[in-house]
Structure formats: C-alpha cells, structure tokens
Amino acid sequence: MTKHINPRKARGIVAVRADAGDAKTVLANLQKTFEEFKAEHDAQLADLKKGQEDVVQSEKVDRINAEITAQQKTLDQINETLAALRVGGAGSDENPAAKEHAQAFEKWFRKGDRNGVESDLAELQVKAALSTDSDPDGGFVVPEETSNTIDRVVGTVSAMRGLATVLPVGTDTYKKLVSQGGASSGWVGERESRSETDTPTLRELVFNTQELYANPATTQKALDDARMNIEQWLANEVSTEFAEQEGAAFISGDGVNKPRGILSYDKVANSSYAWGKTGFVKTGVAGDLTDASNNGSDAMIDLYYSLKQQYRNGATWLMSDATMASVRKFKDGDDNYLWSPATAVGEVPSFLGKPVNTDDNMDAVSANAFPIAFANFNRAYLIIDRFGTRVLRDPFTNKPYVHFYTTKRVGGGIQNFEAIKLMKVAA
C-alpha cells in the first residue's frame, strides 16, 4: 500500500519564535480561508449539477484547499512548539540525588571517564532512582530533566503518543488480562436463590519493548565549550528521530523488533468482527473515497456508528493531511459541511463533531488501502515505555567526532479491538 512519506522535520525544539499571538493569527486566517473554500466549492458543485465543468473553478478550489492544509500544518507546528516549551520536570524542586547525578552526567558527557567519573555516575543514577543497575556496559541513564525534555518533544510530534494510553514499565515485557464479553449478571430479590452466572472469557495480551536508537555526534571542541547546553543539544538531536521512528511503528509496525501498529493486525468487515482483528467499513468506491454515485459522507457516517457508543465518547479520527483535504469537501444531506476548522488555539479540526488528528504514516487513498481510522485511541492502543533513556559515549569510532549512542525501549499494540475501526477503500 502507498504511504505518505513525512518530510523530515527541522531539528530542534524551536525552529522559529512562536507564541499564542502567532497561533491566533494563523487560526483566524484559517477560518477565513475555509469560508472562502466553502463558497468556491459550492459554486463548483452548482456548475457540475448543471452539467458544466469549469476547469478554472476546479483549480481555484484545489488551490484554496491546499492553502487550508498549509495553514493547518503551520498551526499544528506552532501548537507543537508551544507545548514543547511548557517546561515540566524537576526545576527548583529537583531532589539533591538527582541534581548530583545530573552534574556527574554532564562531566562524563563532556570529558568521558576522567578521575573515576563513570564509577561515580553508575552509583549516582541508582541513588537518584533512575536505574537499579549500576553496570555501565549498557550506557548511563540520562538525567530526569533531560529525559522529560525528550519525552515532551516526542509527545508533541508523534500523533499516536498523544492519543494512546502511555504506561511506564520497569521490565521488557508487560502482560495484561482482558475480558472478552465479561461475566453475565442479573436482578434478584433479597431472599431469592442466586443462580450461577457465566464465567468471563479472559485473554492475555503481551506487549514487549524494543530498542529505539539514535546516534548523534559532535566534536570534542564543541563539548569543551561551557556555553553548550548538553541537555538541550541531546534532546534536539534525538527527540525528532525518536518521534519519527515511533510514529511510523505505531501505525504500520509489524511487531518485529518494533511496536505493532494499528494497521498491521488482521482486518475483517465490521459485520464479521471478532476479537483480535480490526473491523472495517468500505468506502463503496474502488480506489477512492467518493465518486459520482457515492458522496463519501455516507461511508464516513457508517464508520462513525460502527464504533460502539461507549467508545465514541473520546473518539478521534486519524488520517493523513492529503486524506483530510479530501474529506473537507464532504457534506450532509442538508448541504452542511461536515469538516470544521479549529475554533481555539491548541485545538484540532473536527469532522462530524469529533477531533481530526493527522499522521502522514497513515495509508494514502488507493485501492484496498486503509486511510482512515476512527477510534477511542486511549482505550484502543497501549504504548509502554521502559523507564530510562540511556547513552553510550563513543569517542573512538569516528574521530574527531564523539558519538552518543542513545537508546530507549518502547513497545506498543492494540489492547482493545472493539475501540478502533478502519475505513477500507473498496467497492
């Protein structure tokens, strides 16, 4: 299946200065452009109903639609930047052990093992409760604030990480028992006998963490510069790489040395749904979301209601930017557009009243592809993070550069197959 390839994002937490005022301006322009889009698209549809096809008008609609996509992307990037700049972590409340560990880590990061720094660092990371392992062969755990900085950036860039349940774990494997259907129950009087109820069917789900790595490099001369903020540098170098790799795996990963993505499970028509498989609804069109006989809206409404009511509260659409540009044109039977732009800074667009998140790792619209998911991702998908980001210092492999082989262990997979439904491009 065809994939939209995400253009490589500029490294760094802040590429341009952004504040709430910038976001409000972009949002206002986006809302204005959407009103222009609706007027021009309505004119295009009116011409088509008359049997007239105006190529110039069609190109105008496509241009405005592309402008909306660009404005939405700009707004998303500003929102990501603002979110990443919301400082969390320890700050002034940092405990003494963590502070001592951070200071030792910086010395080791800049100079390597001089005057027994590695031995001290190994002991300090255990003392700071960052690790139970004092063996440095696997590298050293980064300070808590550095780890928090990396996680904040990854969380704003990776759509799935912001939607799914994220669970920190202390081992490489996490096991979870889930009930399929639950136990039966009933009403009974105070003195009436209680008949035996059915036993719930339990299934064990196993999630394994896999190693995700980045290998940034810099010169020793740069490390010797006291003005270099090593926390910021390391976060800038690895967070985007981690986010891009994670994002792809959470969507299409096959589970082999990586998380298992939402599109990699066996799929069945929703009418034949069974636990362990993801149900889908067809577009009704071979190779597209809509055609002259199918307006696209009906299939989207069918997908909406294929998700049980208890999951629709908190449900979200997930699709690529290109797919969202297509569904932006959909209307209901009363000629109302079903897509709406964000109404406030920090929000995302909506479709049928539900948020629309974009991830260009989702399938492109093509025959037999699955370009749209509608799910309560918080209940449907589980991401597990093995505690601690580790760094190995390597000054030898590529002189005069010093490499920092940085790893974290991440796993993921569907934990509730009822809570996610897909759209299949098929007649």
Image (cartoon, rainbow, N blue to C red):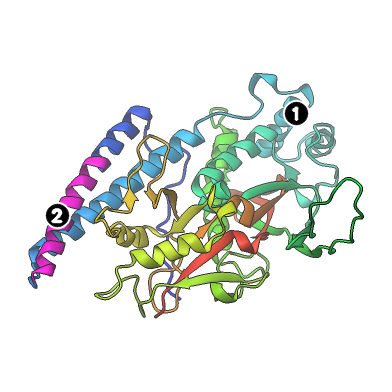
Residue 48 highlighted magenta (yes or no): yes
Q: Secondary structure at mark 2?
A: helix
Q: Amino acid at mark 1?
A: Ala
Residue 143 vs residue 2, the one in the foreground: 2
- Judge whether residue 20 can be spotted in this image: yes
Q: Is residue 4 left or right of residue 26?
A: right
**Distance in Å between CA atoms under marks 2 and 1:** 59 Å
Q: Is residue 305 left or right of residue 186?
A: left
Q: Which residue is mark 2?
A: 40
Residue 229's place in the image compared with 193, above or below, is above
Question: How many marks are shown on the rendered structure?
Answer: 2
**Residue 84, x across and y down, in percent:** 50, 36
Instruction: Tell me what residue is drawn at x 83 percent, y 51 percent.
Output: 188
**Residue 147, x across and y down, in percent:** 65, 39
The numbered mark at residue 98 is 1
Q: Amino acid at mark 2?
A: Glu
What range of the chain is rendered magenta? 31-50
Q: In which quadrant will I find the C terminus?
A: bottom left
